[in-house]
Amino acid sequence: MATTIEIPSRVATRPTWAEVSLTTLQQNFRTVVKKAGPDVTVCAVVKADAYGHGAVECSRALRDEGARWLGVTSLDEAIPLREAGIESRILLMTGFWRGEESEIVRLKLTPTVWEPWHIESLENAAARGTQRQPVHLKVDTGMGRLGVALDELSAVLEALSASPHLLLEGLSTHLASSEIMDAPSVSEQERRFEEAQKMVGAAGFEPKLIHMANTSALISRRETWNKMVRPGIALYGYYLPFQRAGREVSGGTLRLPVKPVLTWKTRILSMRNFAANQALGYGGTYVTRAPAHVAVLPVGYADGYNRQLSNRGRVIVRDHYAPIVGSISMDLTLVDVTGIPGIAVGDEVILLGTSDGLSVDALEHARLANSSPYEILCNISKRVPRKYGN
């Protein structure tokens, strides 16, 4: 007789984790809604697992705060939200693949369309139901990624006119350089989008949701808001620096009082003492100049801790900054804690977050890694458990 071995479930004990404040997320959403005003619908973007924060948990919190629309990349990001009982409108911002149309209709999702086959396949799927299927038409006004070109728009509008089971609810585009205040491409995109709106109206359509503004445009370009805005990174406490004439500009109206939602922490795994002239880590990229007290942290690039922070980044421990020394490896990072009083194995270390007036945020990581706060947050891996609280 075969014996069944029962393996009890375990809670992760490796001391590297991320704390996600759902209360701060909701506060940021309220800030965005206040900025947009009562006449503009806010589509809260939760794609890429809510920028690494956890899409289901964040979507629930946003729904509870009044978010009527959520934005995701694709069907596979929408399904977990529906399975979790989230009934908010969900916009599929990058369309869909062939064969997904029936599931889109069944789950009451709203796809972005721009290809004739999008329209044909959705029409066939919607014809088997009892309600018209809403769609949002995307126009490529200069981003060069997705969307119908202006010279092909008439053909797509004809296809929509011949699809009685579809409802053109929205018209959208995406700005390529909304954080660059003097970028001439933005004005050109606005002009093309206005031309597209006229063509849509001339074809007999009246989409009620016109949208092109992301987080940066929400802050800096009131004329782009139309009837809907699509903030993403702002919900999680960040936005890109604004530039003019190649230089960073800030202050005045170019700000939004949002706060980071995620704090990333670990604990000291081991303590080491080294003499002067000791090479540390892979490749010996750091050599101690004097006797050093070094802490080993159980976090590395497999957790999403960017290797470009090697010998450049810093952490917060016992209300002091401690520099990263040596190359960040897959699972471990070294920091110099020389002179920090009372330092010990088990001490909490802040990788992203604040403490007693000290701060290390995703913008700092992005500058050091020649990246963006989007990438820093999204790259925090699944190996790092998320803990949700206020």
Image (cartoon, rainbow, N blue to C red):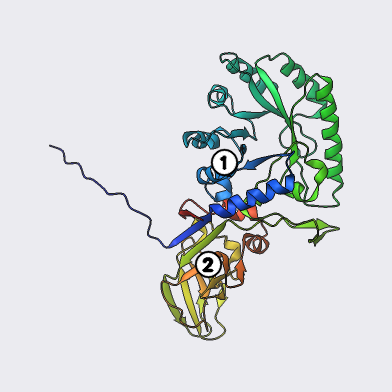
Q: Which one is closest to the eye, mark 2 or mark 1?
A: 1
Can I make out residue 374 in this image? yes
The quarter in which the N terminus is drawn is top left
Horizontal relation, residue 98 to residue 248: left or right = left
> Which element type, helix, strand or loop, lies under badge 2?
strand
**Pointer 2 residue:** 350
Give the alpha-carbon distance from disc 2 to disc 1, as whole Å: 30 Å
| Percent position of residue 86, x then y | 52, 36
- Count residues near mark 2 (Cα–Cα under 10 Å), then give few for <14, some for 14-19, many for 20+: many
- So how many labels did they put on this image? 2
Task: Please tell me whether residue 184 is drawn above or below residue 335 in the rendered image.
Answer: above
- Count residues near mark 1 (Cα–Cα under 10 Å), then give few for <14, some for 14-19, many for 20+: some
At a point 54% along the width and 50% down the height, the residue shown is: 53
Horizontal relation, residue 98 to residue 273: left or right = right
Q: Quadrant of residue 255?
A: bottom right
Q: Quadrant of residue 362?
A: bottom right
Horizontal relation, residue 263 to residue 176: left or right = left
Identify the amino acid type marked 2: Ile
Task: Please tell me whether residue 274 is drawn above or below residue 90 in the rendered image.
Answer: below
Task: Please tell me whether residue 200 is drawn above or below residue 44 in the rendered image.
Answer: above
**Pointer 1 residue:** 63
Task: Please tell me whether residue 322 is drawn above or below residue 211 in the rendered image.
Answer: below
Front-most of residues 188 and 237: 237
| Percent position of residue 204, x then y | 80, 18
Can I make out residue 233 in this image? no
Identify the amino acid type marked 1: Arg
